[in-house]
Every structure is written in C-alpha cells, then in structure tokens.
Image: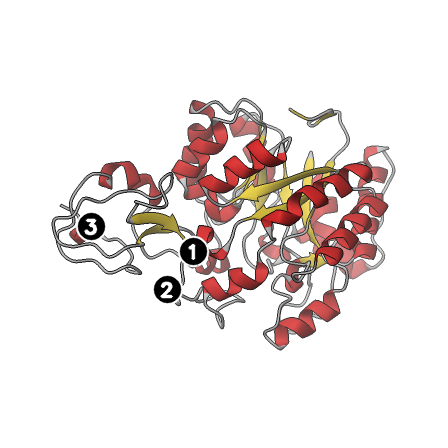
Amino acid sequence: MKIADRKIGKGHPCYVIAEVSCNHEGNLEEAIRIIDAAADAGADAVKIQTYTADTISRNFKTKPEGTMWSDIDLYSLYQQAYTPWEWSQDLKKHAAEKGLHFFSSPFDETAVDFLVDELGVPVLKVASFEVVDKKLLEKMAKTELPIIMSNGMTNFLEMEESVRTLRENGCKDLALLHCNSGYPAAFDEANLKTMQAIAEIFDVPVGVSDHTLFADHEKLEKPMAHVTPVEAVKLGASIIEVHLTMDRDSARALFDKKEGGYDWAFSMNPSEFKDMIAMIRNIEQGQAVEYATAEEAEVASRTHGVVNFEPTPKEIASRNARPSLWAVQDLKAGEVLKFAAEDKANGNFDSIRPGGGLEIRFSDFIEGRKATRDIKAGEPLIWDMVV
C-alpha cells in the first residue's frame, strides 16, 4: 500500500499517525502546536476529524450512556469538540512544511467531498464508529483513495461486511487497524493477536489505533502510554495511530470542569509520543527494547491476549454512540421516506449518532417506502414506522 510517496507494509518503517481530534480545545494555535510536537517526535502524519455538530448528529439531547461522555448530550459535545473546517487548509500547509502527511476521518458524505475536492488529502480514514455506515463507506471507496479503517466495537461479520463494501466500490489500497474502543481501553483487552489474524484473513497491511494509556483503571494516574503500540510493532504492525495532546493534566482539569479535554484519558503527551516512536524505530533496526520497569514489562505481556472478534463489555457501551437511522424532519402518516445522506435539504431521515435506530445497512430498503404513522424529528426509526 502507498500513501503519497510513502510505502506501507512489511519491510517498510511503521507509519505513525498523531491524531489531533479535539485536543486543540477550539484553538487553531494549539492545533498547530500539536502538529509541531508530532513532527519533532518523528511522526509520519497528523490526522484530524471532519464533522460539525449538524453533520454528525442533531440537537435531540441524546447522551452516550455508559461512556466517559455520558454527562453531556452528543450535540453539545460535538459543538465543542469539532475542528472548524476553515482551519483545514492552514493545518495541511503547516503539516507539509513540517514534512508530515495530513488527512482526516470524514463523518458524513459532505465531509468526503470537502476532503477530496477542496483539501486534496492523500488518504481517508474510517473511524471505528462509522464502520457500520455502509453509505459513507461506499462514498469513500468511490474516491479511489487509499483507506485506513479501524475496527473498534465491531464483530467479525460487521468487519467483513465493511471490507467487502469498500472493495466492491473501488477501494484498492486498504489498511486495517485493530482497535479497542473502550475510552480508555484496558491493556488486558488489547488482544493484539487479533491484529495478526486480521492480516492473515484480509491480506492487508495492519496496525493498531490505540486507546490504552493507564495501568490503573480506577484513578487513571499510572500512565504507560507507549506499551501497546510498541508491542504491536513487535507483532507486525505497519501503522500506529495514537491521540496526541500538549498537556494531559490540563486537559483532565478541563474535563473535570466540563469545559473540554474530552479525549484526555487516552491521549499521549509529547514526551510519551516521542519515546514511543524512538522505541519503534529501535525495533525496526533490530535492537532490543527494554521497558523501564518490571511492571511495564508485565503489562506489555498482557497486551498480546487472544484472537477476539467480538466487542468487549466496554465497547458494547460505546456502541450506543454509533450512528443509526433517525427521523430528521417531521413526517405524516403515508409520507415517503427520503434518505438525507446526499440530499440534506429534502431528506427526512438520516444516518446520525447515536444508536437506537435501525442499522444504516437498511437505508436503501427503507428509501421510498411510506411512514405507517406520524413521526417526529428526533425519533429513531424502527420497523413499525415503515410500510
């Protein structure tokens, strides 16, 4: 697989991605500082997320129960956490000046158009929550760009279906990242052997999108941020993606005050990120890598786990925030259902977060059928609403 001028796979250096996510805290200069920190550490790429509160969700006051964000409704969360699209050109230019690739995860079809037609990204990323959005995957695949996809929260059938959807719609260059979408994830549930199974089953470059960070899962005060990525590279990872923040303690304080810091619990500090990359490069040069403490070494051994294609209990809770089909306009009984993915102005149902509605794979089946009863905007679609 190739991204721009960079070959990725066996025999090539690990492709290390710094995920900016919402760690810029709404400040363009902070986003630029994160890019600088990524470059200084020796990363290959930086990634953002392209959505707005209205493209990823609606103001329906829904909350992601069972996750670290359960105290805030999703719309308000995304209003605070999104990366303004108008920053993208400046961020891409700055990344290029630092020698970094720059790309993003789109969360709806309009974001795909923006990233391809206006920004000219070299690769697209499918976020774990969007693996089940078949219409979005079809749109991404038809760009014929390389695609990196995470598998967080999926079972095997969902993962197989998403890979098949991408390949059938034109995606030739595909990489898959094993991911545990518990936020933060436990080292005992990293199950890195699954990554090796993915490589064998799907015949693609593989890696890890990592959300492990703390050895203690109560107080979250004992960081071992580098352990899972380093072990993944030992086991054959060609891509590593981690979240990067400039100051995790400050982000945690913002989160405690409900003012930001929404990804603090699984984001590396720059020093941790730099140490991780140094260890990865040493492994690639055939050098032995020793952990600083016996506890770190013991935790590292637990990340290998077993081959597991089922979501963990924590991931099952995260599935509550996956997109599903919702009514986004009021409908009268007998009114025709129109999917809004490509027609935001006239569509009356759409694939948005959270879960609770019908799975997005049924959108084509529902399109053009009639409502059995009046449906209010903000109701998740269920079968008895559809003729």
Tag 1: residue type? Ser
Please state the horizontal and vertical placement of residue 275, each as a whole percent of the image: 83, 50
Q: Which residue is mark 3?
A: 383
Q: What SS does tag 3 mark?
A: helix
- Label 3 neighbour load within 10 Å: few <14, some 14-19, many 20+: few
Tag 2: residue type? Phe
Please state the horizontal and vertical placement of residue 311, each as a whole percent of the image: 47, 51
Q: From the viewer's perspective, tell me whether residue 11 is left or right of residue 126.
A: right
Depth check, mark 3 against mark 2: the one in front is 2
Colouring rule applied to residues: secondary structure
Residues tagged 3 and 2 counted as in contact (Cβ below 8 A): no
Q: Earlier in the sequence, mark 1 or mark 3?
A: 1
Check the picture and name the quadrant holding the C terminus: top left
Residue closest to the eye, 111 or 70: 111
Residue 57, label in figure: 1
Residue closest to the eye, 51 or 154: 51
**Would you place residue 94 above or below residue 225 in this image?**
above
Residue 304 showing in the rendered view: no
Residue 216 showing in the rendered view: yes
Residue 60, label in figure: 2
**Would you place residue 368 above or below residue 64 in this image?**
above
Please state the horizontal and vertical placement of residue 234, each as a whole percent of the image: 74, 39
Residue at 40% x, 37% y: name it: 134
Residues tagged 1 and 2 counted as in contact (Cβ below 8 A): yes
Residue 68, label in figure: none
- Label 1 neighbour load within 10 Å: few <14, some 14-19, many 20+: many
Tag 3: residue type? Trp
Residue at 55% x, 34% y: name it: 198
